[in-house]
Amino acid sequence: MSRFFGRVGVGILVSFPFTCMLAGGVQDGFALLAISIICTAGIGLVAWIPLWWFVGWVTLLVLAAFKDEPLSRSAPVEDRRELAADPALTTYIKQATASGMDVDEITRRLRLNGWPTADILSAHESLISSLSDRQKT
């Protein structure tokens, strides 16, 4: 229930400036909301609340996508090695690879369990670099 109200709150904050622009100013934006809610005895909320929820949901979705943005493939390997890979994550990847699971499936399962993309890439890179270091010696 708190997620619902959180999305509605974010939706209000994001959509109110657009409402003000469409209405012609801040006072007119408030007036539009007041008239559509008060003069209809609250029935106007039947339209506003789903709109605010949807805008909040989309906004939070976009923000989450930017938060977990994967590292650029063009970044040098040395830069990616600076991120310390989580030992539990690398252990899981080693075991999954040993059991024959492909990289895409491993990544998909880790993402479903809440691991950030940057951590997954870091663990993959650390395993690849450790394997190449072993092969060189």
Image: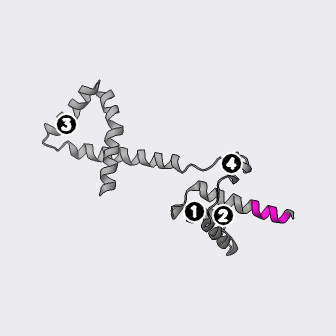
Q: Is residue 87 above or below residue 71?
A: below
Amino acid on which disc 4 is placed: Arg
**Label total for image:** 4
Q: Which mark is residue 108?
A: 1
Amino acid on which disc 3 is placed: Ser
Q: Residues within 10 Å of mark 2 (few under 14, many from 20)?
A: few
Q: Nearer the viewer, residue 96 or 133?
A: 133
Q: Secondary structure at mark 4?
A: loop
Q: Which residue is mark 2?
A: 103
The magenta span reads: 129-135
Q: Nearer the viewer, residue 74 or 52?
A: 74
- Say whether residue 119 is left or right of residue 131: left
Could you tell me how far apart the alpha carbons at marks 3 and 1 are, in whole angstroms?
45 Å
Q: Is residue 30 above or below residue 94?
A: above
Could you tell me how far apart the alpha carbons at marks 4 and 1 are, in whole angstroms?
18 Å
Task: Residue 21: name its quadrant.
Answer: top left
Mark 3–mark 1 contact, CB under 8 Å? no
- Say whether residue 63 is left or right of residue 74: left
Placement of the N terminus among the 4 image quadrants: bottom left
Decide which of tag 3 and tag 4 comes sooner along the chain.
3
Amino acid on which disc 2 is placed: Val
Decide which of tag 3 and tag 2 comes sooner along the chain.
3
Could you tell me how far apart the alpha carbons at marks 1 and 2 are, in whole angstroms?
9 Å
Mark 4–mark 2 contact, CB under 8 Å? no
Amino acid on which disc 1 is placed: Arg
Q: Which residue is mark 3?
A: 36
Q: Which residue is mark 4?
A: 73
